[in-house]
Amino acid sequence: MDYSIESATLDKLQSDCLVVGIYENQPLDNNAKQLDALTSGLLGQLLGRGDIKGKLGETLLINHTGLAGVDRIVLLGFGDKNQLSRKSYRKAIQSLVKLLREAKLKSATAALLDIEVQAADLVWCGRQIVEVFHDGVYQYSATKKIEDKVALTRLAIAANAEQLPLASQALQQGQAIAQGVELAKNLADLPGNICTPTYLAQQAQTLAAHHPHLQCDVLEEADMQALGMGALLGVSRGSRQPAKLISLHYQGADASVKPIVLIGKGLTFDAGGISLKPGLGMDEMKYDMCGGASVLGVMRMVTELNLKLNIVGLIPASENLPDGDANKPGDILTSMAGKTIEILNTDAEGRLILCDTLTYAERFNPDVVIDMATLTGACIVALGRVPSGLFGNDDALCEDLQRASEAACDAVWRMPIWEEYQEQLKSNFADLANIGGPDGGSITAACFLANFAKDFRWAHIDIAGTAWRTGANKGATGRPVPLLSQYLINRAG
Protein backbone atom coordinates (compact mmCIF):
# COMPACT_ATOMS: atom_id res chain seq x y z
CA MET A 1 0.00 0.00 0.00
CA ASP A 2 1.10 3.52 -0.80
CA TYR A 3 0.07 6.06 1.86
CA SER A 4 0.16 9.83 1.62
CA ILE A 5 -1.27 13.06 3.04
CA GLU A 6 -3.74 14.98 0.86
CA SER A 7 -3.78 18.69 1.65
CA ALA A 8 -6.16 19.87 -1.11
CA THR A 9 -9.51 21.19 0.08
CA LEU A 10 -12.57 19.08 -0.71
CA ASP A 11 -13.68 21.38 -3.52
CA LYS A 12 -10.32 20.95 -5.28
CA LEU A 13 -9.74 17.31 -4.46
CA GLN A 14 -8.91 14.77 -7.15
CA SER A 15 -9.84 11.27 -5.97
CA ASP A 16 -11.27 7.97 -7.17
CA CYS A 17 -13.18 7.72 -3.91
CA LEU A 18 -13.68 10.21 -1.08
CA VAL A 19 -14.63 8.89 2.36
CA VAL A 20 -16.36 11.10 4.95
CA GLY A 21 -17.78 10.20 8.34
CA ILE A 22 -21.31 10.75 9.65
CA TYR A 23 -22.91 10.21 13.05
CA GLU A 24 -26.16 8.46 13.90
CA ASN A 25 -29.19 10.73 14.36
CA GLN A 26 -27.00 13.82 14.49
CA PRO A 27 -26.51 16.73 12.09
CA LEU A 28 -23.77 16.58 9.48
CA ASP A 29 -20.50 17.88 10.85
CA ASN A 30 -17.26 19.32 9.45
CA ASN A 31 -16.18 17.43 6.30
CA ALA A 32 -19.59 15.82 5.75
CA LYS A 33 -21.29 19.20 6.05
CA GLN A 34 -18.87 20.76 3.57
CA LEU A 35 -19.31 17.88 1.13
CA ASP A 36 -23.10 18.16 1.41
CA ALA A 37 -22.86 21.79 0.33
CA LEU A 38 -20.59 20.90 -2.60
CA THR A 39 -23.05 18.23 -3.80
CA SER A 40 -26.18 20.40 -3.55
CA GLY A 41 -27.48 18.65 -0.44
CA LEU A 42 -26.95 15.07 -1.65
CA LEU A 43 -25.87 13.73 1.73
CA GLY A 44 -28.84 15.26 3.48
CA GLN A 45 -31.20 13.73 0.91
CA LEU A 46 -29.70 10.26 1.38
CA LEU A 47 -29.98 10.54 5.16
CA GLY A 48 -33.50 11.92 4.90
CA ARG A 49 -34.82 8.96 2.94
CA GLY A 50 -33.02 6.43 5.19
CA ASP A 51 -30.42 5.13 2.74
CA ILE A 52 -27.96 5.31 5.60
CA LYS A 53 -28.51 6.13 9.25
CA GLY A 54 -24.92 6.55 10.44
CA LYS A 55 -24.83 3.48 12.66
CA LEU A 56 -21.39 2.28 13.67
CA GLY A 57 -19.69 0.58 10.73
CA GLU A 58 -22.54 1.30 8.31
CA THR A 59 -21.37 2.24 4.82
CA LEU A 60 -22.91 3.67 1.66
CA LEU A 61 -21.10 3.84 -1.69
CA ILE A 62 -22.27 6.66 -3.96
CA ASN A 63 -21.19 6.18 -7.59
CA HIS A 64 -22.43 9.48 -9.03
CA THR A 65 -21.18 12.50 -7.11
CA GLY A 66 -21.69 15.52 -9.34
CA LEU A 67 -18.14 16.63 -8.47
CA ALA A 68 -15.57 17.11 -11.21
CA GLY A 69 -12.64 15.71 -9.25
CA VAL A 70 -14.30 12.96 -7.20
CA ASP A 71 -15.60 9.80 -8.88
CA ARG A 72 -17.21 8.16 -5.86
CA ILE A 73 -18.16 8.99 -2.29
CA VAL A 74 -18.37 6.63 0.67
CA LEU A 75 -20.34 7.62 3.76
CA LEU A 76 -19.05 5.85 6.85
CA GLY A 77 -21.13 5.63 10.03
CA PHE A 78 -19.54 6.21 13.44
CA GLY A 79 -22.63 5.83 15.61
CA ASP A 80 -23.24 8.16 18.56
CA LYS A 81 -20.74 11.02 18.47
CA ASN A 82 -20.64 11.19 22.24
CA GLN A 83 -19.88 7.48 22.69
CA LEU A 84 -17.27 6.81 20.02
CA SER A 85 -14.51 4.74 21.67
CA ARG A 86 -11.16 3.80 20.23
CA LYS A 87 -12.31 0.24 19.61
CA SER A 88 -15.48 1.46 17.87
CA TYR A 89 -13.45 3.81 15.66
CA ARG A 90 -11.26 0.91 14.50
CA LYS A 91 -14.37 -1.22 13.92
CA ALA A 92 -15.79 1.45 11.62
CA ILE A 93 -12.53 1.67 9.66
CA GLN A 94 -12.53 -2.12 9.28
CA SER A 95 -16.01 -1.90 7.71
CA LEU A 96 -14.69 0.71 5.32
CA VAL A 97 -11.78 -1.47 4.22
CA LYS A 98 -14.18 -4.37 3.62
CA LEU A 99 -16.38 -2.19 1.40
CA LEU A 100 -13.46 -0.83 -0.62
CA ARG A 101 -12.07 -4.33 -1.13
CA GLU A 102 -15.40 -5.70 -2.30
CA ALA A 103 -15.91 -2.72 -4.63
CA LYS A 104 -12.48 -3.41 -6.21
CA LEU A 105 -11.45 0.22 -5.83
CA LYS A 106 -7.77 0.97 -6.46
CA SER A 107 -7.42 4.14 -4.38
CA ALA A 108 -9.27 6.25 -1.85
CA THR A 109 -8.99 9.47 0.15
CA ALA A 110 -10.07 9.30 3.79
CA ALA A 111 -11.33 12.66 5.10
CA LEU A 112 -11.82 11.33 8.63
CA LEU A 113 -9.53 13.40 10.83
CA ASP A 114 -12.53 15.48 11.91
CA ILE A 115 -14.08 12.47 13.67
CA GLU A 116 -13.84 12.86 17.45
CA VAL A 117 -12.83 9.76 19.42
CA GLN A 118 -12.91 9.47 23.20
CA ALA A 119 -9.44 9.56 24.81
CA ALA A 120 -7.72 9.87 21.43
CA ASP A 121 -5.98 12.66 19.55
CA LEU A 122 -5.52 13.34 15.86
CA VAL A 123 -2.21 11.46 15.71
CA TRP A 124 -3.85 8.35 17.11
CA CYS A 125 -6.82 8.60 14.72
CA GLY A 126 -4.65 9.08 11.64
CA ARG A 127 -2.35 6.26 12.68
CA GLN A 128 -5.24 3.84 13.11
CA ILE A 129 -6.45 4.51 9.58
CA VAL A 130 -3.10 3.31 8.24
CA GLU A 131 -2.81 0.36 10.64
CA VAL A 132 -6.33 -0.92 9.99
CA PHE A 133 -6.07 -0.47 6.22
CA HIS A 134 -2.71 -2.25 6.05
CA ASP A 135 -4.02 -5.15 8.10
CA GLY A 136 -7.22 -5.30 6.05
CA VAL A 137 -5.48 -5.62 2.67
CA TYR A 138 -2.87 -8.16 3.81
CA GLN A 139 -2.67 -11.27 1.66
CA TYR A 140 -0.24 -14.13 2.20
CA SER A 141 1.47 -14.91 -1.10
CA ALA A 142 4.87 -16.42 -0.30
CA THR A 143 3.85 -19.98 -1.22
CA LYS A 144 0.46 -19.42 -2.85
CA LYS A 145 -0.58 -17.81 -6.12
CA ILE A 146 -3.21 -15.14 -5.43
CA GLU A 147 -5.88 -15.20 -8.13
CA ASP A 148 -8.03 -12.43 -6.66
CA LYS A 149 -5.54 -9.80 -5.54
CA VAL A 150 -6.72 -6.81 -3.53
CA ALA A 151 -7.13 -3.93 -5.96
CA LEU A 152 -6.68 -1.22 -3.31
CA THR A 153 -3.10 0.02 -3.48
CA ARG A 154 -3.24 3.74 -2.56
CA LEU A 155 -4.70 5.59 0.40
CA ALA A 156 -4.51 9.32 1.06
CA ILE A 157 -5.44 10.90 4.39
CA ALA A 158 -7.03 14.32 3.93
CA ALA A 159 -5.70 17.02 6.27
CA ASN A 160 -6.15 20.79 6.34
CA ALA A 161 -3.27 23.18 6.97
CA GLU A 162 -3.81 23.13 10.73
CA GLN A 163 -3.90 19.34 10.87
CA LEU A 164 -0.95 18.79 8.54
CA PRO A 165 1.94 18.50 11.08
CA LEU A 166 0.09 16.01 13.29
CA ALA A 167 -1.25 14.12 10.27
CA SER A 168 2.30 13.69 8.99
CA GLN A 169 3.36 12.31 12.39
CA ALA A 170 0.39 9.95 12.34
CA LEU A 171 1.30 8.73 8.87
CA GLN A 172 4.90 8.06 9.88
CA GLN A 173 3.91 6.14 13.01
CA GLY A 174 1.13 4.26 11.25
CA GLN A 175 3.35 3.10 8.41
CA ALA A 176 6.12 2.01 10.77
CA ILE A 177 3.78 -0.05 12.96
CA ALA A 178 1.93 -1.47 9.95
CA GLN A 179 5.20 -2.59 8.37
CA GLY A 180 6.26 -4.19 11.64
CA VAL A 181 2.97 -6.07 11.87
CA GLU A 182 3.28 -7.13 8.24
CA LEU A 183 6.79 -8.52 8.79
CA ALA A 184 5.61 -10.49 11.83
CA LYS A 185 2.64 -11.89 9.90
CA ASN A 186 4.70 -12.79 6.84
CA LEU A 187 7.20 -14.73 8.95
CA ALA A 188 4.58 -16.43 11.09
CA ASP A 189 2.47 -17.54 8.13
CA LEU A 190 5.43 -19.28 6.47
CA PRO A 191 5.57 -23.07 6.81
CA GLY A 192 8.06 -24.67 9.15
CA ASN A 193 10.08 -26.20 6.34
CA ILE A 194 10.92 -22.69 5.11
CA CYS A 195 10.92 -20.64 8.30
CA THR A 196 13.56 -22.58 10.23
CA PRO A 197 15.77 -21.19 13.01
CA THR A 198 18.44 -20.51 10.38
CA TYR A 199 15.91 -18.65 8.22
CA LEU A 200 14.83 -16.48 11.17
CA ALA A 201 18.47 -15.64 11.83
CA GLN A 202 18.94 -14.67 8.19
CA GLN A 203 15.90 -12.39 8.32
CA ALA A 204 17.32 -10.69 11.41
CA GLN A 205 20.66 -10.18 9.67
CA THR A 206 18.91 -8.72 6.62
CA LEU A 207 16.95 -6.33 8.83
CA ALA A 208 20.13 -5.19 10.59
CA ALA A 209 21.93 -4.65 7.29
CA HIS A 210 19.41 -1.94 6.35
CA HIS A 211 19.91 0.32 9.39
CA PRO A 212 23.14 1.85 10.69
CA HIS A 213 22.07 1.73 14.34
CA LEU A 214 21.00 -1.93 14.28
CA GLN A 215 23.43 -4.80 14.77
CA CYS A 216 22.74 -8.54 14.65
CA ASP A 217 24.70 -11.33 16.36
CA VAL A 218 23.76 -15.00 16.14
CA LEU A 219 24.88 -17.52 18.75
CA GLU A 220 25.36 -21.03 17.42
CA GLU A 221 24.85 -24.21 19.43
CA ALA A 222 28.57 -24.36 20.29
CA ASP A 223 28.32 -20.83 21.72
CA MET A 224 25.28 -21.80 23.76
CA GLN A 225 27.05 -24.91 25.00
CA ALA A 226 29.95 -22.80 26.19
CA LEU A 227 27.50 -20.55 28.06
CA GLY A 228 25.85 -23.52 29.75
CA MET A 229 22.44 -23.13 28.09
CA GLY A 230 21.38 -26.69 28.85
CA ALA A 231 17.66 -25.91 28.88
CA LEU A 232 17.61 -24.31 25.42
CA LEU A 233 19.88 -26.93 23.89
CA GLY A 234 17.83 -29.70 25.48
CA VAL A 235 14.85 -28.64 23.36
CA SER A 236 16.79 -28.57 20.08
CA ARG A 237 18.28 -32.07 20.54
CA GLY A 238 15.36 -33.72 18.76
CA SER A 239 15.73 -31.59 15.63
CA ARG A 240 18.09 -31.74 12.66
CA GLN A 241 17.81 -27.96 12.44
CA PRO A 242 20.45 -26.27 14.63
CA ALA A 243 19.17 -23.89 17.27
CA LYS A 244 20.04 -20.20 17.05
CA LEU A 245 20.02 -17.45 19.65
CA ILE A 246 19.42 -14.29 17.64
CA SER A 247 20.53 -11.02 19.23
CA LEU A 248 19.56 -7.64 17.74
CA HIS A 249 21.03 -4.46 19.21
CA TYR A 250 19.53 -1.05 18.44
CA GLN A 251 21.27 2.04 19.79
CA GLY A 252 19.15 5.14 19.43
CA ALA A 253 20.23 6.78 22.71
CA ASP A 254 23.48 7.39 24.55
CA ALA A 255 25.40 4.19 25.31
CA SER A 256 24.99 4.85 29.04
CA VAL A 257 21.19 4.51 28.82
CA LYS A 258 20.03 1.10 30.00
CA PRO A 259 18.37 -0.91 27.23
CA ILE A 260 14.88 -2.33 27.01
CA VAL A 261 15.25 -6.05 26.31
CA LEU A 262 12.57 -7.79 24.26
CA ILE A 263 12.57 -11.59 24.14
CA GLY A 264 10.45 -13.59 21.68
CA LYS A 265 9.92 -17.33 21.69
CA GLY A 266 11.05 -18.65 18.31
CA LEU A 267 9.86 -22.29 18.13
CA THR A 268 9.63 -22.57 14.35
CA PHE A 269 7.73 -25.84 14.73
CA ASP A 270 6.50 -27.59 17.86
CA ALA A 271 5.40 -31.23 17.58
CA GLY A 272 5.64 -31.59 21.35
CA GLY A 273 8.77 -33.73 21.29
CA ILE A 274 8.43 -37.17 22.91
CA SER A 275 5.21 -35.90 24.55
CA LEU A 276 3.75 -35.76 21.05
CA LYS A 277 0.85 -33.41 20.37
CA PRO A 278 -2.40 -34.71 18.81
CA GLY A 279 -2.28 -34.68 15.02
CA LEU A 280 -5.41 -32.56 14.56
CA GLY A 281 -4.37 -28.93 14.35
CA MET A 282 -0.66 -29.65 14.68
CA ASP A 283 -0.05 -27.68 11.46
CA GLU A 284 -0.76 -24.53 13.46
CA MET A 285 2.33 -25.17 15.54
CA LYS A 286 4.30 -23.32 12.86
CA TYR A 287 2.92 -20.31 14.76
CA ASP A 288 4.92 -21.19 17.87
CA MET A 289 7.51 -18.65 16.70
CA CYS A 290 5.11 -15.69 16.73
CA GLY A 291 6.92 -14.19 19.73
CA GLY A 292 10.18 -14.18 17.78
CA ALA A 293 8.44 -12.82 14.68
CA SER A 294 6.98 -10.02 16.82
CA VAL A 295 10.43 -9.05 18.09
CA LEU A 296 11.58 -8.68 14.47
CA GLY A 297 8.45 -6.69 13.65
CA VAL A 298 8.99 -4.35 16.60
CA MET A 299 12.65 -3.84 15.70
CA ARG A 300 11.62 -2.90 12.18
CA MET A 301 9.17 -0.35 13.59
CA VAL A 302 11.88 1.08 15.85
CA THR A 303 14.30 1.55 12.97
CA GLU A 304 11.62 3.20 10.82
CA LEU A 305 10.90 5.76 13.55
CA ASN A 306 14.50 6.06 14.80
CA LEU A 307 13.27 6.02 18.39
CA LYS A 308 15.68 7.52 20.91
CA LEU A 309 15.96 4.34 22.96
CA ASN A 310 18.41 1.49 23.36
CA ILE A 311 16.75 -1.85 22.65
CA VAL A 312 18.00 -5.42 22.61
CA GLY A 313 15.90 -8.05 20.84
CA LEU A 314 16.59 -11.69 21.71
CA ILE A 315 15.05 -14.62 19.85
CA PRO A 316 15.80 -18.18 20.98
CA ALA A 317 14.96 -20.22 17.89
CA SER A 318 14.60 -23.99 17.68
CA GLU A 319 12.31 -26.84 16.70
CA ASN A 320 10.76 -29.31 19.15
CA LEU A 321 10.53 -32.74 17.51
CA PRO A 322 10.60 -36.40 18.58
CA ASP A 323 13.88 -38.18 17.95
CA GLY A 324 16.13 -40.82 19.48
CA ASP A 325 18.22 -38.02 20.99
CA ALA A 326 15.29 -35.86 22.12
CA ASN A 327 14.49 -35.01 25.75
CA LYS A 328 12.48 -37.65 27.56
CA PRO A 329 10.03 -37.19 30.43
CA GLY A 330 12.05 -37.62 33.60
CA ASP A 331 15.26 -36.15 32.15
CA ILE A 332 17.08 -33.48 34.16
CA LEU A 333 18.52 -30.43 32.41
CA THR A 334 20.83 -27.79 33.85
CA SER A 335 20.00 -24.21 32.86
CA MET A 336 22.43 -21.36 32.25
CA ALA A 337 21.47 -20.03 35.69
CA GLY A 338 22.66 -23.30 37.24
CA LYS A 339 19.15 -24.44 38.22
CA THR A 340 18.27 -28.02 37.43
CA ILE A 341 14.94 -28.73 35.72
CA GLU A 342 13.02 -32.02 35.68
CA ILE A 343 11.29 -32.54 32.36
CA LEU A 344 7.83 -33.90 33.13
CA ASN A 345 6.41 -33.00 29.72
CA THR A 346 8.58 -32.28 26.67
CA ASP A 347 5.76 -30.18 25.19
CA ALA A 348 6.42 -27.54 27.87
CA GLU A 349 9.50 -26.47 25.92
CA GLY A 350 8.91 -22.75 25.43
CA ARG A 351 9.73 -21.97 29.05
CA LEU A 352 12.99 -23.93 28.64
CA ILE A 353 14.32 -21.84 25.76
CA LEU A 354 13.05 -18.67 27.42
CA CYS A 355 14.60 -19.32 30.83
CA ASP A 356 18.13 -19.49 29.41
CA THR A 357 17.45 -16.38 27.33
CA LEU A 358 16.24 -14.52 30.42
CA THR A 359 19.50 -15.40 32.14
CA TYR A 360 21.44 -14.30 29.06
CA ALA A 361 19.58 -10.94 29.14
CA GLU A 362 21.20 -10.07 32.47
CA ARG A 363 24.50 -9.25 30.73
CA PHE A 364 22.91 -6.22 29.07
CA ASN A 365 22.11 -4.58 32.43
CA PRO A 366 18.52 -4.01 31.28
CA ASP A 367 16.12 -1.33 32.43
CA VAL A 368 13.25 -3.75 31.80
CA VAL A 369 12.86 -7.15 30.16
CA ILE A 370 9.66 -8.09 28.31
CA ASP A 371 9.16 -11.54 26.84
CA MET A 372 6.37 -12.60 24.52
CA ALA A 373 5.52 -16.19 23.76
CA THR A 374 2.82 -18.52 22.49
CA LEU A 375 3.43 -20.31 25.74
CA THR A 376 0.34 -22.11 26.99
CA GLY A 377 -2.97 -23.43 25.72
CA ALA A 378 -4.11 -22.82 29.28
CA CYS A 379 -4.04 -19.08 28.57
CA ILE A 380 -6.69 -19.61 25.88
CA VAL A 381 -8.82 -21.56 28.35
CA ALA A 382 -8.50 -18.72 30.88
CA LEU A 383 -8.89 -15.68 28.61
CA GLY A 384 -10.09 -16.85 25.21
CA ARG A 385 -8.65 -15.18 22.13
CA VAL A 386 -9.36 -11.54 22.96
CA PRO A 387 -6.64 -10.40 25.41
CA SER A 388 -3.10 -11.68 25.81
CA GLY A 389 -2.13 -12.75 29.31
CA LEU A 390 0.14 -10.30 31.13
CA PHE A 391 2.35 -11.36 34.02
CA GLY A 392 5.18 -9.50 35.72
CA ASN A 393 7.20 -8.80 38.84
CA ASP A 394 6.94 -5.00 38.60
CA ASP A 395 3.64 -3.13 38.93
CA ALA A 396 4.84 0.03 37.20
CA LEU A 397 6.01 -1.91 34.14
CA CYS A 398 2.76 -3.88 33.94
CA GLU A 399 0.71 -0.70 34.28
CA ASP A 400 2.70 0.91 31.46
CA LEU A 401 2.02 -2.10 29.26
CA GLN A 402 -1.67 -2.06 30.15
CA ARG A 403 -1.96 1.61 29.21
CA ALA A 404 -0.14 0.96 25.95
CA SER A 405 -2.44 -1.97 25.20
CA GLU A 406 -5.51 0.22 25.65
CA ALA A 407 -4.13 2.90 23.33
CA ALA A 408 -3.08 0.32 20.72
CA CYS A 409 -6.35 -1.67 21.00
CA ASP A 410 -4.11 -4.71 21.53
CA ALA A 411 -5.61 -5.95 24.77
CA VAL A 412 -3.86 -7.61 27.70
CA TRP A 413 -5.24 -8.86 31.02
CA ARG A 414 -2.99 -9.06 34.05
CA MET A 415 -2.72 -12.42 35.75
CA PRO A 416 -1.24 -13.30 39.16
CA ILE A 417 2.11 -14.98 39.79
CA TRP A 418 1.69 -15.41 43.53
CA GLU A 419 4.21 -17.40 45.52
CA GLU A 420 1.61 -20.07 46.28
CA TYR A 421 1.75 -21.24 42.66
CA GLN A 422 5.45 -22.02 42.98
CA GLU A 423 4.48 -25.02 45.11
CA GLN A 424 3.21 -26.74 41.95
CA LEU A 425 6.69 -26.57 40.38
CA LYS A 426 8.46 -28.49 43.14
CA SER A 427 10.34 -31.63 42.11
CA ASN A 428 11.77 -34.52 44.11
CA PHE A 429 14.73 -34.71 41.74
CA ALA A 430 15.55 -31.19 40.54
CA ASP A 431 15.33 -27.54 41.58
CA LEU A 432 12.22 -27.11 39.42
CA ALA A 433 9.76 -29.17 37.41
CA ASN A 434 8.94 -27.82 33.97
CA ILE A 435 5.18 -28.13 34.50
CA GLY A 436 2.94 -27.61 37.49
CA GLY A 437 0.01 -29.86 36.74
CA PRO A 438 -3.33 -29.10 35.07
CA ASP A 439 -4.42 -26.25 37.36
CA GLY A 440 -3.51 -22.68 36.43
CA GLY A 441 -1.26 -23.75 33.58
CA SER A 442 -0.54 -20.30 32.20
CA ILE A 443 0.20 -19.02 35.71
CA THR A 444 2.59 -21.82 36.63
CA ALA A 445 4.39 -21.34 33.30
CA ALA A 446 4.89 -17.68 34.16
CA CYS A 447 5.95 -18.64 37.68
CA PHE A 448 8.57 -20.94 36.17
CA LEU A 449 9.98 -18.01 34.16
CA ALA A 450 9.86 -15.73 37.20
CA ASN A 451 12.57 -17.89 38.80
CA PHE A 452 14.95 -16.65 36.10
CA ALA A 453 13.89 -12.98 36.21
CA LYS A 454 14.54 -12.07 39.83
CA ASP A 455 17.35 -9.61 39.13
CA PHE A 456 15.49 -7.20 36.84
CA ARG A 457 12.08 -5.68 36.17
CA TRP A 458 10.28 -8.21 34.00
CA ALA A 459 6.98 -8.79 32.21
CA HIS A 460 5.76 -11.84 30.33
CA ILE A 461 3.04 -11.71 27.65
CA ASP A 462 1.37 -15.02 26.79
CA ILE A 463 0.10 -14.63 23.21
CA ALA A 464 -1.05 -18.22 22.67
CA GLY A 465 -4.63 -17.07 22.07
CA THR A 466 -3.93 -13.86 20.17
CA ALA A 467 -0.95 -14.43 17.84
CA TRP A 468 -2.97 -16.14 15.14
CA ARG A 469 -6.53 -16.83 14.05
CA THR A 470 -7.72 -20.38 13.61
CA GLY A 471 -10.50 -21.83 11.45
CA ALA A 472 -11.54 -20.54 8.01
CA ASN A 473 -9.64 -17.26 8.51
CA LYS A 474 -6.48 -18.98 9.76
CA GLY A 475 -3.51 -16.65 9.76
CA ALA A 476 -1.17 -14.60 11.89
CA THR A 477 -2.42 -11.41 13.56
CA GLY A 478 0.92 -9.69 14.19
CA ARG A 479 0.06 -9.19 17.86
CA PRO A 480 1.58 -7.94 20.14
CA VAL A 481 3.54 -5.68 17.76
CA PRO A 482 1.01 -2.81 18.13
CA LEU A 483 1.11 -3.05 21.93
CA LEU A 484 4.90 -3.04 22.16
CA SER A 485 5.17 -0.32 19.52
CA GLN A 486 2.90 1.91 21.60
CA TYR A 487 4.87 1.10 24.74
CA LEU A 488 8.16 2.06 23.07
CA ILE A 489 6.69 5.21 21.51
CA ASN A 490 5.47 6.19 24.96
CA ARG A 491 8.92 5.49 26.44
CA ALA A 492 10.58 7.55 23.73
CA GLY A 493 8.27 10.45 24.45
Image (cartoon, rainbow, N blue to C red):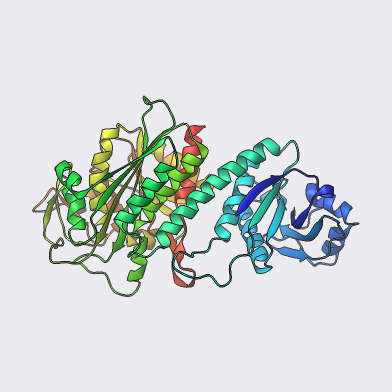
Please provide percent x and percent y for residue 106. Answer: 68, 61
Left or right side of 169 for 284: left
- Residue 47 located left or right of residue 147: right
- Residue 211 position, x and y percent, is 44, 39
Among all residues in the image, which is located at the extreme right?
A: 40
Whether residue 407 sits left or right of residue 191 in the image: it is right
Name which residue lies at 62% across and 52% down.
2
Q: Compare residues 188 and 451 and report the one nearer the observer.
A: 188
Residue 94 appears anywhere in the view: yes
Q: x and y percent of residue 425 in the render?
A: 19, 52
Judged left or right of residue 152, residue 338 is left
Q: Which image quarter: residue 284?
A: bottom left
**Residue at 17% across / 47% down in the picture?**
222
Specify whether residue 85 is in view: no
**Of 69 and 400, the residue lying toward us:** 69
| The N terminus, quarter of image | bottom right
Of residues 110 and 447, the one drawn nearer to the viewer in this rendering: 110
